[in-house]
C-alpha cells in the first residue's frame, strides 16, 4: 500500500457536523496525533479490508481487416 512518504499526496474534502469535528480534533490532540494521520490510517485499514481483488483486463488485440481486390 502506498503511504504519504512514497507517493504524491492529494486532498480529500469531507463534510461532517461541527461538533463531530471538534470531538475528533480534541481526541487526536490528546493523543498527539494529527487528524490527517488518523484518517489516513483508517482509510488504509478500510482499503485493506474492503478493496476488491481486481483481475487484470485482457489485452486488446488490434486487428487490421484486409480487403480483397476484385477484378471487374
Image (tube, rainbow, N blue to C red):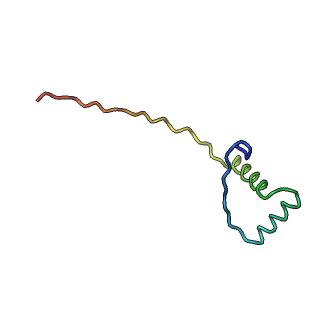
| Residue ID at (37%, 32%) | 63
Q: Quadrant of residue 36?
A: bottom right
Whether 70 is drawn above or below 14: the answer is: above
- In the image, residue 30 sits, relative to residue 63, either above or below, namely below
**Percent position (x, y) of residue 22?**
80, 69
Q: Quadrant of residue 34?
A: bottom right
Residue at position x 68%, y 67% from top? 15
Name the residue rendered at 89%, 61% in the picture: 30
Picture quarter with the C terminus = top left
Asked if residue 9 lies left or right of residue 65, the reply is: right
Residue 14, image x and y in percent? 68, 63
Residue 25 position within the rendered picture, expressed as x and y whole percent measured from the top left: 81, 64
Q: Quadrant of the N terminus?
A: top right
In front of the other: 72 or 50: 72
Which residue reaches farthest left? 72
Residue 27: where, in percent of width, then height?
85, 63
Residue that appears at 57% across and 39% down: 55
Label tally: 0
Amino acid at each position: 500500500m502506498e503511504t504519504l512518504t512514497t507517493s504524491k499526496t492529494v486532498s480529500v474534502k469531507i463534510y461532517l457536523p461541527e461538533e463531530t469535528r471538534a470531538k475528533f480534533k480534541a481526541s487526536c490532540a490528546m493523543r498527539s496525533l494529527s487528524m490527517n494521520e488518523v484518517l489516513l490510517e483508517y482509510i488504509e485499514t478500510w482499503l485493506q479490508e474492503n478493496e476488491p481483488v481486481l483481475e487484470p483486463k485482457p489485452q486488446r488485440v488490434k486487428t487490421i481487416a484486409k480487403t480483397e481486390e476484385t477484378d471487374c
